[in-house]
Amino acid sequence: MQRLSLEPAALHVARLTPLLEWLQTHLALPILLRTPYSAYLELHCEGHNSHVLLLEEHPEAPASTLRLEADNAEFEHLAPRLTSQGARCLEASREHPSASRGCAWRVLTMPLPGDWQLMLLALDPYRCQHLGPHRLAP
């Protein structure tokens, strides 16, 4: 699992503890450093590590979306458990094809504590179109 590259590495939250407990319980994200007002989490993806810093701010800190990308195996492991707890899974299909040429994205969305949202994204390699020699879908 990794943070999307354009997403901020530091997230400001109104209440740290409930969000952190949820992330540990459901995504098993390791905590590298914990203080009363912050937590530094580690994400792993194919031998590369990235990090997310959660900072507790004032109670009016606006909620946002935590966007993470998972590989196919991680997504298939997490999706049934999270959908049983209210997550919605959106997938490209023949009726609703992916907007990304040659890719079949799956997106799982779920409410998190403190009005935050989780958006877990993954490519489904079994449904990606094979690209021809000119990198175009047939």
Image (spheres, rainbow, N blue to C red):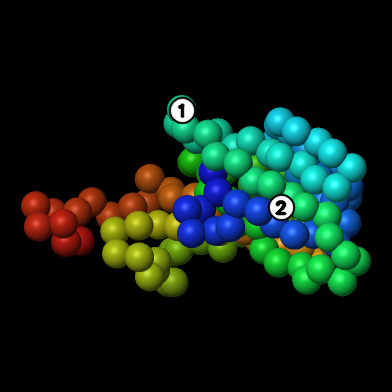
Residue 24 in view: yes
Please name the amino acid that badge 2 sits on.
Thr
Quadrant of the frame with the N terminus: top right
Q: In the image, residue 24 lies at what x, y percent?
A: 78, 38
Q: CA distance from mark 2 to mark 1?
A: 28 Å
Going 35% across and 57% down the picture, which residue do you hit? 103
Q: Is residue 119 above or below residue 70?
A: below
Q: Provide the residue designation for mark 2.
A: 83
User: Can you name the residue that lies furthest to the left here?
Assistant: 133
The residue carrying pointer 1 sits among few (fewer than 14), some (14 to 19) or many (20 or more) residues within 10 Å by Cα, namely few
Query: Residue 28's quadrant in the figure?
Result: top right
> Which numbered disc, 2 or 1, marks the residue closer to the eye?
1
Left-right relation of 79 to 2: right
Query: Residue 38's quadrant in the figure?
Result: top right
Nearest the eye: 59 or 66? 59
Q: Provide the residue designation for mark 1.
A: 47
Nearest the eye: 87 or 21? 21
For marks 2 and 1 on the same chain, the one whose residue lies earlier in the sequence: 1
Q: In the image, residue 42 lies at what x, y percent?
A: 63, 35
Going 49% across and 41% down the picture, which residue do you hit? 72
Going 76% across and 68% down the picture, which residue do you hit? 63
Residue 22 in view: no
